Image: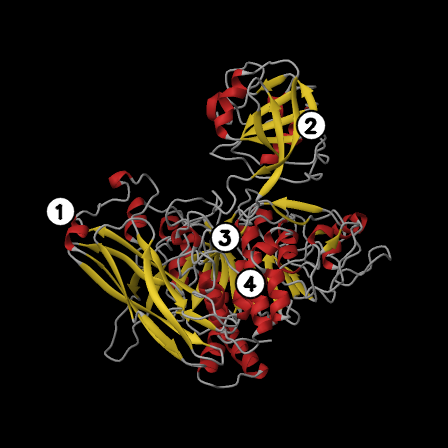
Amino acid sequence: MRRRVFAALTVATLAFGAMAPTTAVAAGPISRFQKVTTVKIDPQVTPYLIDKSRQLDLMVELSDESVAARVGDATDNGTTVTTSDRDTWRNQMKTNQTPVVDAVRKSGGTVLSQMQDAYDGVHVHIPAGAVSTIAAMPDVVGVHLVPTYKPALTESVPYVGAPQAWTQSGGTGAGVKIAVIDTGIDYYHADFGGSGDPADYTYGLAHDTTAPGYDADGKTVAFPSAKIPKGWDFVGDAYDASSTIAANTVPQADANPLDCDSHGTHTASTIAGFGELENGSTYHGSYTSSIDESKFKIGPGVAPNATLYIYKVFGCNGSTDVVTEAINRAVQDGADVISMSLGSDFGTSNTPDAVAADNASRAGVVVVASSGNEGTSAYMTGTPASSSRTISVAAIDSNATFPGATIELSTPIAAIYANNGKLPVTGNLDVLTSFDPDHTTGDGVSPGGISLGCSAADYEGTAGKIVVTARGNCARVLRAQLGQTAGAVAVIMVNNDTGLPPYEGTIPAQSVYPAVTIPFIGVDIKDGPALLAANGTKQVKIDSAGKLDNPTYKSLADFSSWGPRFGDSALKPDITAPGVSIVAAGMGTGNDVLVDSGTSMAAPHVAGIAALVIAAHPGWNVNDVKAAIMSTADDTSAKIVGYDPLGAGSGVAQAQRATTTAALALTNDHLDSLAFGYRPLDGAFSDVESFTIVNKGSKPITYNLAASFIGGKAGAKVKVDPSKVTVPAHQWRDVDVTLSLSASAVAALPTAETSSGMGPGAVLTVEGVVTATPTASGTGVYPLHVPFLLVPRGDSQVAA
């Protein structure tokens, strides 16, 4: 089913946008009619060229248009592209890459891969001394650093309206092919129709370089399957792009994408798991009739009948640098949707992976990626989600309640009962502190002097006690694992911010640690001093306390990366979905769960929604699918509190609206938000951006249009023209939005991001939302939302 459709960054670069590529003219005489060859070495590469012998991981970009881009051009022109056309283009591009391949090898470098479908490029390890020679070759248009990437249901899937979408649209993703670029998948897990036997996974992992289709001790043929018909391991289990062991940085590909990290299994479960009943069996019932979520151990994924293509780009630990290759392969294999729960910070629109993602979209593939987990500082949103056509996803907390606990001190402390350890427990309170000679940490001090507890040595002498630690620096659950190993009866973790730490759910066996059976309890940062003061108290009791209201319910996750996009200050992320304490399939467990948090958990929800939209509207192109998801998002307090486009994009994705909407709001630049950009100003400002309302339905729709600012914007005005519009059936109408700042408002602008009390990492913005409100109800008629963003700054007059 086809559809049309980093090196260190200085403060100055962050403030003023990305620097232009360094440009040089090829040496030698130039006659009047001689072609002038321009070479471009990405400025991020330049600092690494000093040591000529240093091996660099680079992407050499060539001048041919990718197969995906050619498909997009042909489709735009109404031309049919055949498989033979694609093969011809691909083979010619590979031939054109041969001189670069030969030159890299002659220089002592290594060619890791060649790409033609989503990107015309050659991924190389090459000595720094050879870069200028390669860059000067006639068909080379760019040499780029390859970023390294970090692997960025029963409540969350209903929160985005998926069950309503199944019922209203009648579709559950059947026939849609979703490529998951991640750590692989545990295809033995019952959620994907596997045997559900952990022994099969153990056997399979020991033989995971064997050709697909082998029989694990006669018990099951797990891969390929009807659910997972295609996949590829690009790297091997030992691979880590950031490893200090040189051999581990070289990918060792094989045909078996079995997960050994858990991340990919979890994300694939959210996208398209069948669901698993309480008895551990795979759910094979209907999704379009009412189902009782309480009967499920793991709820169905967002698009439970979609097909999964699995591309493993991570080893068992660490980072990766082969994302562009995986995008290229997904396009070649004919995927309809690509889901990437990964990223590299400070994303721009022109990194190789972002270009490949954009090209994939041009060829008819909807690309979804997580925004990142670096928090609220400006410009943190990552690549490849930074691509204009890619849907970048932020994370929200969709959990209304959690299991509660009470720590019985003189003033009881309300806590989150973060796992399923046995309560009640009693014991002496032993607070790990920086000034306690029995507990040496070396990994820092958290609020109130409570130490992090990230080392086994910290837990010496804690047998039979209730241990208190602080959140930060290491994995949260490591504290429970270390405490249990030392004999503690419970571990309390003090959060490092206002509110409670995340719910963990069952903490399974991991590495050298068995499954955690002692209680793991979380408290607010404000409760740290009381616990510290109670250090050594005898017979403290912790007991369960029913359901606990979640104070961060409907709020953006504190880890979710905010925009805008680095370089041009366009609005990213695009959309928001649940990403806190998400319950999905746990790798290696057979039929058990893993609870995990991150924008990695949010992106799969939107990838699943994209599949539902494609299934409901086979004739829609990529632009339509993205616009349907973004413009029908919910930015009201019903789904999100403290809404801010800079962190949440258009709002919370709603599958039931996206799949049934009769109209879309989209922009020509494919952002589907209004990007007024980064503007150094020395006088009054006014500019116009436009969007188009497209009526896909059979009846005219009339809208009232109005804009509102997020936060007070003194001296700023926004005008929407027209203020009322009727869009006939199967027609469209353009809407102009004029944003202006008075001269006095511009004069009051700061000239640095840290001025006016904004603080480090902040950015001054003028932002808001244009809302098209229908004047009458009807089938598929919803309000449409288009956020807008301006990043103004007072223009400094500096003379040297």
Most foreground residue, 137 or 7? 7
Q: Could you say which disc has been placed on residue 800 in the image? A: 1
Q: Amino acid at mark 3?
A: Lys
Mark 4–mark 1 Cα distance, whole angstroms, equals: 56 Å
Mark 3 or mark 2: whose residue is earlier in sequence? 2
Which of discs 1 and 2 lies nearer the camera? The answer is 2
Looking at the rendered image, the quarter that the N terminus falls into is bottom right
In the image, residue 159 sits, relative to residue 785, either above or below, namely above
Residue in the picture at 68% in, 66% down: 288
Q: Could you say which disc has been placed on residue 655 in the image? A: 4
Residue highlighted by disc 2: 484
Q: Is residue 225 left or right of residue 218?
A: left
Q: How packed is label 1: few (under 14 Cα within 10 Å), some, or many (20 or more)?
A: few
Q: Is residue 717 left or right of residue 697?
A: left
Residue occupying the far front of the picture: 776
In x, y percent, where is residue 431? Answer: 57, 20
Residue highlighted by disc 3: 639
CB atoms at circles 1 and 3 under 8 Å apart? Answer: no
Residue 42 visible in the snapshot? yes
* Secondary structure found at label 4: helix
Mark 3 or mark 4: whose residue is earlier in sequence? 3
Which of discs 4 and 1 lies nearer the camera? The answer is 4
Residue 120 visible in the snapshot? no
Mark 4 or mark 2: whose residue is earlier in sequence? 2
Mark 1 or mark 2: whose residue is earlier in sequence? 2
In x, y percent, where is residue 56? Answer: 46, 52
Mark 1–mark 2 Cα distance, whole angstroms, equals: 63 Å
In the image, residue 120 sits, relative to residue 321, either above or below, namely below
